Amino acid sequence: MSSVGPPAQWRGGPPAAPAPRAMWWRCLLGGLALWVLALVVTYATQNTNLLPTLILLGSFLVPFCFALWAYEKERGLGLDVLLGCFVVGGVLGVLGASVLEYYLLHPSLWLFLGVGLIEEAVKAAALMFVLRRHREIHGLRAGLVLGAAVGFGFAAFESAGYAFNALFTLHGMSLRGLVETEILRGLLAPFGHGLWTAILGGALLADREAGRFRLTGRVVGTYVGVSVLHALWDSVSGIAVWLVYVLTASPQQHALFDRGYIPRPTGEQKHLYTLLSDGGLIVVALLGVAWLLSVARGGSRRR
């Protein structure tokens, strides 16, 4: 990621001792080892007191390490600002999204677009709130880094909630469900909230002047674009089901659907659904990564 304008070194006073490079990589490996150890001990002892440790480690490991990776691209911002965006921004984001989605959204064809618009708006608002006193922080690169921090914080707290819910089933607690949820969300984390909010944060801080955030055409367009990416990501599963139905449903399955029943899918339909849903996620992820790289390279050329 690259910046526009002067390097992001705003703090006065004596310079802090340089932190070691590749902290994110060491944190990822060490955290993964601790998570595996916590999983083994929890499974062996069946000690439910260890479940919060397992949930927190698994939910925060990947998002925090990627936020740390982003910070290493722009150390002049300060670790305190990064942590503020990750923790405060993440908490404010999930709380704001929960309230707005509860009161504003209802089941409809546009549900996922509404989710995208709300969640990207609250993450942007959280970023602006955290940086309200840091009037000196501006520029594309700072926005990419701190936007990613807010997005990854949001993802971490959201994943903790999903992992907690996956733990409880009709047949009791499911350690397997918790682990599968954490692994899946950990693998997908780099291509979701952190990516989208990095792009939006870059636009917000690139157009910030004299400490004031401006809703320029670029900011509004970026907000709409990342919200659409967010909506596509959330709706991939439903789109895959619809495509499987349109492409492969037999007359008997059509008849059952018309009567309000959900027919049992065939083996071929299950495989096609997996292909379409996984392929859809990959396409949306690649679109987001390509957009981020384009923004970063464009900023580099304007330096």
Image: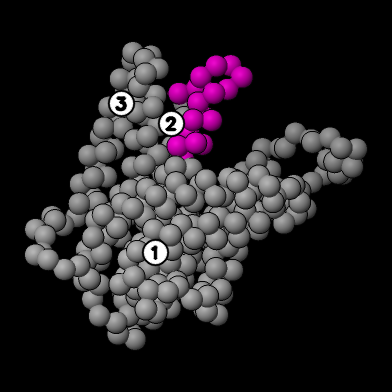
Residue named by callout 3: 38
Picture quadrant of residue 258: top right
Q: Nearer the viewer, residue 91 or 66?
A: 91
Residue 38 image position (x, y, % from top left): 30, 26
Q: Secondary structure at mark 1?
A: loop
- Residue closest to the far bottom: 302
Residue named by callout 1: 132
Residue named by callout 2: 179
Using the image, determine if residue 218 lies above or below residue 170: below
Instruction: Please name the amino acid that badge 2 sits on.
Output: Val
Q: Position of 141 compared to 272: left or right?
A: left
Residue at figure coordinates x 33%, y 48% from the top left: 64
Residue range highlighted in magenta? 159-175
Residue 199 makes an appearance in the image:
no
Q: Position of 294 compared to 44: left or right?
A: right
User: Can you tell which of label 1 and label 2 is closer to the viewer?
Assistant: 1
Q: Earlier in the sequence, mark 3 or mark 1?
A: 3
